Image: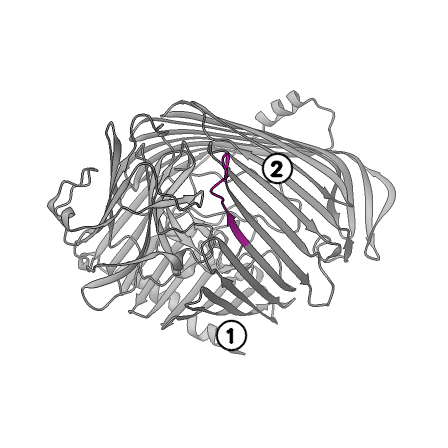
Amino acid sequence: MPIRFIRSLTAPLPRALLLCSMLVAPCSALAAEQDAIVVDGLASESFWQQAQVFDQLVAVEPFTRETPKHQQRIRVISLPAGIAVHFDIDQPPEVLRTKPNTQRDRAGPADRVNVVIDYDNQGLTAYNFTVTLAGNIEDGIVGRNSFNADWDGDWKYAVQETEQGWTVEMLLPWTITAMAPVDGDTRTIGIYLDRVLKSTGERFAYPAIRYSQSDYVNSLAEISVKNYAATTSNWFPYVSMVYDQVNDDVDQKVGLDWFFRYSNAFQLIASLNPDFGQVESDDLVVNFSAIEVFFSDKRPFFTENHDDFKLPLPDEGELIYTRRMGANRDDGKGVANIDVASKLRLASSNSSLSYLVVREEDFGDDIGRQFQVLRPRLLLGDTLIGAAIMRTEKPYFDRVADVLAVDAEQSFASGLKLRGQWLQSEIDQSLTEKEGGGAWLTLDYNPVAEWQHTLEFLHYDDDLQLSDLGFVQRTNLEQGAYFGRHVQTHENWNMLKEIEWVTRLSKSRNQQGEDLPDWFRLSANLRFANADQLYLFYRHESAGVDDLISRGNGLWNKPAVNLAILEYIGARRVDMAWGAVYEQGQEGLRDYYRDYAIGLTYFFADQLSTEFWLGYRDSQDWLIWQQANEFSRYRSHRGSVDWQLDWFPDEHQELRLKFQWLNIDGVDGQRYTLFDRRMNASGQAVEDLHINTLGFQLRYRYKLSLLSDIFVVYSRGGFEQNNDTSESTGQTFSDALSLRDADQLLFKWRMHF
């Protein structure tokens, strides 16, 4: 089989690359020539007179294409140090300025400007750089129908405010990301520029496109800039100490991340004894479904120059899910430490070869895991062809999982784009082998910015296994789907400025020929003149076979269900903003549930704000799997509290408090047995189910520079499950405050040289 060559191909690579990571001398990296630019927001240097000027921005939110009342002039110029961008924004005193301080990558509540650049102009991946009026930033990676804010780049910015407006200056170094080498002195890039006026909910942009378009990255404006070579070597040593108050234990670590870029053709990232613990806490989740929950990844090693390893699958899947690396140990004894990890990228003008290896602690003792990915890509005209050769070794389970994926993308001038991927897996465990295959194909058609049509076809064998390294909701699937989007505006509308319609239809079955539930979804996002938004959503799920709910212990003929959601997102009024959500749907054996949530964001000052959400869910039909073919059906009540407090004493300091509490009570329980594809009531009562869980984090950050920080983080949380549902809400909350499954104090110092 084609996949068998993976073993011989990848076997020597970990040792070779890990050795390279430790031996390549950083002294070969020469500092890039620096132009005489001072990033102060003023653009007073003489070279700005030669910059390209963009001043024809139009309204894209709402999508009226109207000329703004107040102007914005943007200049772009290429320098040896990087691409420099200057915004000159008119905003007279009578136009409200919204400038709360926010954490990095949470710039949404403020007036802001954005630059998006596709450095290779291939329509595949672009990078977003955002600066707010308050001087906060957001950066991330933009792809097809996706925006990932996990990536944090090293770039410079400054803001100046005047009575009649404000200015922003950015310097985006040539070393900020991987890009293909080019011949000659010029580089063609794709670019997008916009300005957001938060008080009116308006966005003005050049060109006139929107993030929600599937061809967004393909539609960036093309400009030519001078091309410069750049070399850099960045060292990130760290020291961390964690005091575990539950076990009275102290864990101390010292490690190093190294990002080395000799040229666009050669880049290397290596980590020795990396600290992959996150200072950002994950959201509190209680999951009883057969599908795992997806979590994003903020660990620098996995976000820096990671474009080649971003391989999305249909239905929000990922072929390479980095949270698998350094996850819970296979022997169940805590979280796995990673000894060493490296990424290597070699590139030419139309091709690249990338390699990733991650080795966990105790791999040599048959406990830890090792992950490898080899990723070649080749651009032939408008066709991009790539492959991913992946191996996951789990010696504790005597398991080796090999996956081979071949992907291709083809763009056409008529607004058509064709994407597809062929997949094959081979699992070798305990001297037995199992092979599976699959493929998917997507056709995007975007005739104009207001319309999008997507057809999607998917085939996954029942023996296809991707979850050793990837994330996929399910295999054993054949599916056809249509996705449509339309932005509707009208010049005679007054209060209502725009409606964005989105619809999805899907038809599914498994490889045994069983019809799975089909889906119809329709949503409308309404934007009003006062910057409020109203979101309407309806979903119908037809009757069909559920072959996952029993975890392999039988099929269930699931009845048809419906869901409706009404969500109000209020604009900021003076010092506060409101939000509310109402959800009503059917679950279990088709009885109803209702979900309510209300939220308030209050700004005590631009430096101090709080956000509070209170939720309640009442269900008449909560059905959960217990074991084999046995289920429990409850009436349930769920309450939740989400509270966050952010304080920015000055430009270097941040203090954040995050508190989450979730309580679920299941009462009047009855035992059901899945037999002959039906849920059959046994007449047996089951004990009540009480779940109480809490997560709390107090995080202090002192910012030494953009990528150098000192963190002091206190985290506490716990989970409790029993049969006592008689307690009052107040007592349940009090019990939650006493939970201590985790109680840790973290100190971390990360430097950038």
Residue furthest out toward the right: 683
Residue, x 58% and y 60% (percent of image)?
397
- Left or right of residue 401: residue 238: left
Tell me, yes or no, whether the two marked residues, 1 and 2, touch with CB atoms within 8 Å.
no
User: In front: 702, or 439?
Assistant: 439
Residue furthest out toward the front: 492
> With respect to residue 65, does 30 lie above or below?
below
Residue, x 87% and y 45% (percent of image)?
682
> With respect to residue 657, does 117 lie above or below?
below
Mark whose residue sits in front, 1 or 2: 2
User: In front: 621, or 490?
Assistant: 490
**x and y, in percent, of residue 706 in the image:** 28, 40
* Neighbourhood count class around disc 1 (C-alpha, 10 Å): few under 14, some 14–19, many 20 upward: some
User: In front: 378, or 541?
Assistant: 541
Give, as a three-letter code, the residue at label 1.
Answer: Ile
> With respect to residue 320, does 733 lie above or below?
above
Q: Is residue 495 magenta?
A: yes
**x and y, in percent, of residue 224 in the image:** 24, 60
Residue, x 32% and y 32% (percent of image)?
134
Q: Which mark is residue 3?
A: 1
Q: Which residues are magenta?
A: 485-497
How far apart marks 1 and 2 lie (CA) works out to 48 Å
User: In front: 398, or 632?
Assistant: 632
Residue furthest out toward the bottom: 1
* Neighbourhood count class around disc 2 (C-alpha, 10 Å): few under 14, some 14–19, many 20 upward: some
Q: Is residue 206 magenta?
A: no
**x and y, in percent, of residue 457 in the image:** 59, 66
For disc 2, the marked residue is 566
Disc on the earlier residue, 1 or 2: 1
